[in-house]
Image (spheres, rainbow, N blue to C red):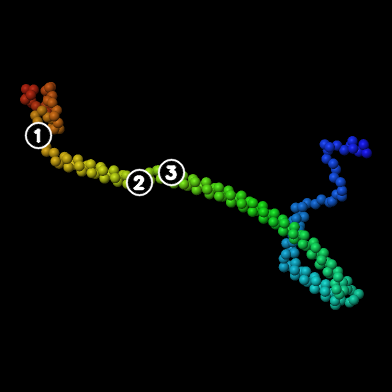
Amino acid sequence: MADQRRTERLDQPREPRGVKLPRFDPEAFGRWSEGIARGMGTANFIVYMTVVIALWFGWNTLAPADLRFDPYTFTFLTLVLSLQASYAAPLILLAQNRQTDRDRVALEEDRRRATMQKADTEYLAREVAALRIALGEVATRDFLRSELARLAEELDAAAQRRQKRELRQPERPVGRGEGRSGGGEPPLDEPRDDLDGDYARDGRRPDS
């Protein structure tokens, strides 16, 4: 007994005790149960089962007595149908549980996608609002057209006012000391050449 206690160590896991059941793949068994449940839920299964039961009844009723394997009261048929129902119910429940798990996963995925879409929609709404605010401060085509039209009107009004002032002012006579441009230029000190024709000032003749 002491030796057995010495061999048991706390830092090592203890071997499991009891009967070891055979292991199987739950996923493969689940797919198999879903296939059976899907097949039992079709019209073909009902038709085939009805045909088998009718043949069972007919054979055990109309066949010779020595060939009947399940005479009246059909005890063996009742046992077979009870066995079928006892296995069909858990298989159907297993298939339903697997379908419920898949629906739960799909629902969580849909909820996650809905949350992401909501976040994206809110982000896009904020971006659109920011763009609208920014565009409100930008000069648009209509604004530029209105400003250009107003500037053209102001230029036309200024040109008309200047034209009216020029019409109201009388023309001044050009003095002796003013040039051809009408300005008040002082006379030049140097003698002018032959082009201006001022020969009286420099005392020369045109042919000299």
Residue 172: image quadrant is top left
Q: Residue at x 82, y 64 (%)?
A: 83
Q: Residue at x 19, y 40 (%)?
A: 162
Q: Is residue 131 placed above or below 43 in the rendered structure? A: above
Q: Amino acid at mark 3?
A: Ala
Say few, some or many: other residues with alpha carbon within 10 Å of mark 3 (under 14 / 14 to 19 / 20 or more).
few
Asked which secondary structure carries label 3, the reply is helix
Question: Residue 97, percent across and down?
Answer: 72, 56
Question: Residue 100, percent across and down?
Answer: 69, 56
The image quadrant where one finds the N terminus is: top right
Viewer-nearest residue: 3 or 23: 3
Q: Amino acid at mark 1?
A: Pro
Disc 1 from disc 3: Cα separation: 62 Å
Question: Residue 58, percent across and down?
Answer: 83, 75
Residue 173: image quadrant is top left
Disc 1 from disc 2: Cα separation: 50 Å
Mark 2 highlights which residue?
A: 143
Question: Residue 144, percent across and down?
Answer: 34, 45
Q: Is residue 147 placed above or below 191 in the rendered structure? A: below
Mark 3 highlights which residue?
A: 134
Are the residues flagged by discs 1 and 2 in contact, CB closer than 8 Å? no
Q: Amino acid at mark 2?
A: Phe
Tag shown at residue 201 = none
- The answer to whether residue 125 is left or right of residue 59 is left
Q: Residue at x 85, y 77 (%)?
A: 62
Are the residues flagged by discs 2 and 3 in contact, CB closer than 8 Å? no
Mark 1 highlights which residue?
A: 173
- The answer to whether residue 154 is left or right of residue 47 is left
